[in-house]
Amino acid sequence: MTQKSILVGIDIGGTKTAVVLAQQPPEVLARAEFATRPAKGPQQALNLIKKSVRDLLAEKGWDAGAITRLGVSCGGPLDRVQGVIQSPPNLSTWENIPLKAILEDEFKVECLVENDANAGAVAEHRFGAGQGCQSMVFLTMGTGLGAGIITGGRLYRGANDLAGEIGHVRLTRSGPIGHNKAGSAEGWASGGGLAQLAAQSVAEAQRKGKKTLLADHVRTGKPISAREVGAAARKGDAVALEILRSTGERLGEVLAILVDVLNPERIVIGGLAMRLGDLLLDPARRVMQREALAQSANACNVVPAALGESIGDVAALAVAMGI
Amino acid sequence: MTQKSILVGIDIGGTKTAVVLAQQPPEVLARAEFATRPAKGPQQALNLIKKSVRDLLAEKGWDAGAITRLGVSCGGPLDRVQGVIQSPPNLSTWENIPLKAILEDEFKVECLVENDANAGAVAEHRFGAGQGCQSMVFLTMGTGLGAGIITGGRLYRGANDLAGEIGHVRLTRSGPIGHNKAGSAEGWASGGGLAQLAAQSVAEAQRKGKKTLLADHVRTGKPISAREVGAAARKGDAVALEILRSTGERLGEVLAILVDVLNPERIVIGGLAMRLGDLLLDPARRVMQREALAQSANACNVVPAALGESIGDVAALAVAMGI
């Protein structure tokens, strides 16, 4: 087998896991995806990761000798240096899984592990909306709310890899719960927070006899997703528009804290902001401008992430490249 | 005149200005100090700065040819690159003073200018309580509240030199005013905030017929200083102790934001924290531990600045050395 210099990226999420091969990221040469099924424990997913890597290599006519490095992007908490996954909220059965050791033993090549907010920040900085920035914050706004921070053109990890936990910062004395803290930024300005607010708002609308397109979703008993709120808002649904305005304004308070503390050139927002766009970002920018120092707010562009649905793949490849 | 490699540090404050000479900072070879008197406009102070530099050099038998570089530490806002002082709150008559150009013209040698929070951060990082840290926050808690941030072992300035404006971050919807913002961190947790709280607390104590050692200060009409509150607290004065507990707890909320966002190894606090010590820092640490992520709070030491009253001199010399 000739030297192929293949990088393997593994993006492990609570719903799905993706395995990708690349020579020159962000270009992907081969890709596999499967359901992570954390409820079934980690073993099945670990086996599928190993199998997917071998299958993708075989598909291209290569073997494990072609791999230069593996990179894993995964939700925290995790021990980056030892490469151990420490029971993240979205992978609750993955208790102290020594992923680095497992994969290095399997493929006889170095494996690096990084939390998904940091990996996403580097991916957007290197290949997406943050290109050329010396200072940047990547805000990952999914079920939770976290951040990866770029200072001096490089990832800033903090004392023990926990920098960027903006979701844990308090916005109000009490309020919706996120990151195990009532009134936190994650409680107010995340997919989870938006779902809590949507459930309340629709219930209130129904009590008051106000019509809303979201009423159907409540009847099914499933949480209302950001996508559904966005679709209703685009049809002019007043309740949906109010939910997005309110969540956007809380997001603006979060942005103001980041702007005052970090004075970044750019804040790149993934997840909800990509799907909802200016419905969410207009109120967010307005509150940021009101709350933050004017000179710092004026210096900061707030933009949606550019890598779209491929951000997980590229984040894992950025880890494999070395951060 | 032989090559002497003299660094000149100039620390410009609202009350006093110091000029120091050094060859190997933080060791100071000669020092002069005079009242800044901003009410009289900048010209008198500028003349005294030039004269002090020449007098100190002459005292040592040197002339301006001995100077390697001048460094100025001054309150912001300022344009660091152009070296222009832009009317800081404590030097309100200094409107767009091109200090770098003035001093370079006078001494024919490079002059660097940096805001005092950043210069203080580098001074404590290089010579004080932050030595050896890769990540550190220096909190300057005087009349105002600002921060200088070290990431990757270097000063982090942000997009336009405004990183670290933690004093502008909102803690509550309304409250004492600091940084032109009601309910801001500076309103709650600074010397100015403490003076506002002390005036209220003493007035309330007097209404309720409670005795306090601070009552005398109120009679004079002058603001109560942190030092006076500290002295009364050390004598067991209940009102003074309550003022420090309350300010310390608000400081703890500020520390928690810094810990969650930056996960620093150390937070070094100058100004009030040096003078009040654990009277202020014990409640601050307690609230920080409650409010911040446990793993990040446990990784962060909160300590008073080590350079004491010489921090201004050393900060200016750090600027002259190059940051």
Image (cartoon, coloured by chain):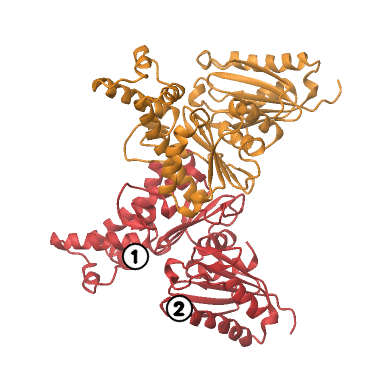
Chain colours: A red, B orange
Image coordinates of residue B132 in percent, x first then y, are 66, 44
Q: Amino acid at mark 1?
A: Ala
Of labels 2 and 1, earlier in sequence is 2
Label 2 amino acid? Answer: Gly
* Residue B310 occupies quadrant: top right
- At x 59% / y 75%, what residue is drawn? A28
Q: How many marks?
A: 2
Q: Is residue A165 visible?
A: no
Looking at the image, which residue is at 36% across and 14% down? B216
Disc number for residue B104: none
Q: Nearer the viewer, residue A308 or A171?
A: A171
Q: Chain of mark 2?
A: A
Alpha carbons under labels 2 and 1: distance apart: 28 Å
Residue depth check, mark 2 versus mark 1: number of the one nearer the observer:
2
Residue A132, image x, y percentages: 60, 54
Residue at image x 65%, y 29%? Answer: B314
Marks 2, 1 in one chain? yes
Vertical placement of A190 versus A254: above or below? below
Residue picked out by circle 1: A226
Residue A26 position, x and y percent, is: 59, 69
- Report helix, strand or loop for mark 2: loop
Label 1: chain letter: A
Element carrying mark 1: helix
* Image position, residue A163 (x, y; %): 52, 53
Q: Residue at x 52, y 13 (%)?
A: B40
Image vertical order of residue A232 relative to residue B74, above or below: below
Q: In the displayed structure, does residue A132 sit left or right of residue A231?
A: right
For disc 2, the marked residue is A41
Q: Label 2 neighbourhood size at 10 Å, few (<14), some (14-19), many (20+)?
A: some
